[in-house]
Amino acid sequence: MTTTADATSTVRERYARFARDEAPGRSEVYREWAAGVAGDPEMQQLLARIAPSRRQPPLVFAVTRLLGAPEAGYASWAAWTRAHADAVVAECDRRSVQTNEPLRCAALLPALALVPGPIALLEMGASAGLCLYPDRYGYRYRRADGDEVVLEPADGPSPVTLTSELRGDRMPPLALPEIVWRAGIDLEPLDPRDPDTERWLTGLVWPGETGRAERVRRALRIAASDPPLLVAGDGAEKIAEVAALAPPDATLVVTTPGVLALMPWPARHATIAAARAAGRWVTIDAPALHEGWTSPVDVAEWPGGFAVALDGEVVAAADPLGGWLEWRAEDAATPR
């Protein structure tokens, strides 16, 4: 039986870890707030009232900002949060982290380019579906020497430009896929046409992350102009049902960019099995996250970042949100 002391201890440890390992370099505001919570027993007790699956720092901090908390020092934020404790607890219990980062498409794109088209794209954990439009975005892959690979949709420059650093000596296959159908599955899908979706998704951007909120806004306009099919439900249970709706003359590709980490170990592997049974599978995951790779990934030798894989075959290392890419497959130009 979980006691209040256990819950507050869990909050303290989680927020201390976030302040130490996750926020530095991304958001000084969130680092200060998390460090403050880790040293504040009263705030730990308050946050322990939130369901365990809904009290992670990015979610709690985004909810407080959504409700009006000042983006100020810890003392001001904590005073506001204590004054609005009931509202914060209630809102956290109905929300979830649904970070919908279009830049992940910069990491997905080279793997998708290995799949012969046309493609029917199905994303797990789709949120508002912003990673379902890799063919509608523009790309700038930049090398350290200043060289740049530029891609734009055939009908003209996209209002969304995804810039990613290209590391290493190998050149990945870079071409926009032909996508003829797009759908997503999420426990609580978000309508890209709903103003509340924009408020929530931009609110999930951490203070200090320059350019992300505007990128989300622009991508939402693309999604709203041609909304994907979004289905509510558990991924492993829904994949086959939704995949059956795809055009039969298209290659079905199931993507799981960053979503498997949110699932318990058995559910991760059930989802991977369902994705591979339905069609091709593209993912971006931490190397140690699951056992779905076709060959074991040597974590000790891994260059950092997440692994990008096609049908379990690791083809690249990448920043979890797509900020950089290092191609690692030997036969980069060979379709699979």
Image (cartoon, grey):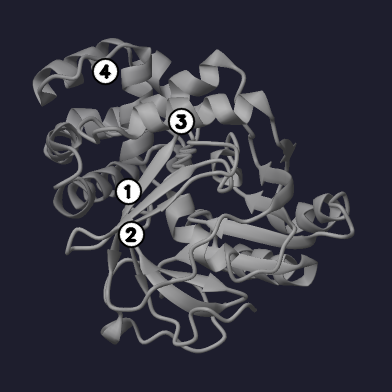
Find disc 1 in the rendering and name its residue: 6
Task: Name the residue at 57% across, 77% down.
Answer: 312
Q: Are marks 4 and 3 in contact (CB under 8 Å)?
A: no
Task: Give the labeled residue for mark 3.
Answer: 159
For label 2, the SS is: loop
Say which amino acid is labelled 3.
Pro
Q: Earlier in the sequence, mark 2 or mark 3?
A: 3
Corner quadrant of residue 112: bottom right
Task: Between label 4 and label 3, give the one nearer the viewer.
Answer: 3
Q: Could you say which quadrant of the image residue 224 lies in? A: top right
Spot occupied by residue 40 in the image (x, y as percentages of width and height) = 14, 33
Left or right of 148? Residue 134 is right
Mark 1 vs 4: CB contact within 8 A: no
Q: Quadrant of residue 76?
A: top left
Q: Which residue is label 2 attached to?
A: 319
**Residue flagged by tag 4: what amino acid is it?**
Thr
Q: Above or below — where is 70 with respect to 118?
A: above
Name the residue: 54% across, 61% down.
Answer: 264
Front tag of 1 and 2? 2
Instruction: Give the residue pinned by disc 4.
Output: 81
First in sequence: mark 1 vs mark 2:
1
Quarter of the picture containing the C terminus is: bottom right
Please, what secondary structure does the residue beneath circle 1 have?
helix
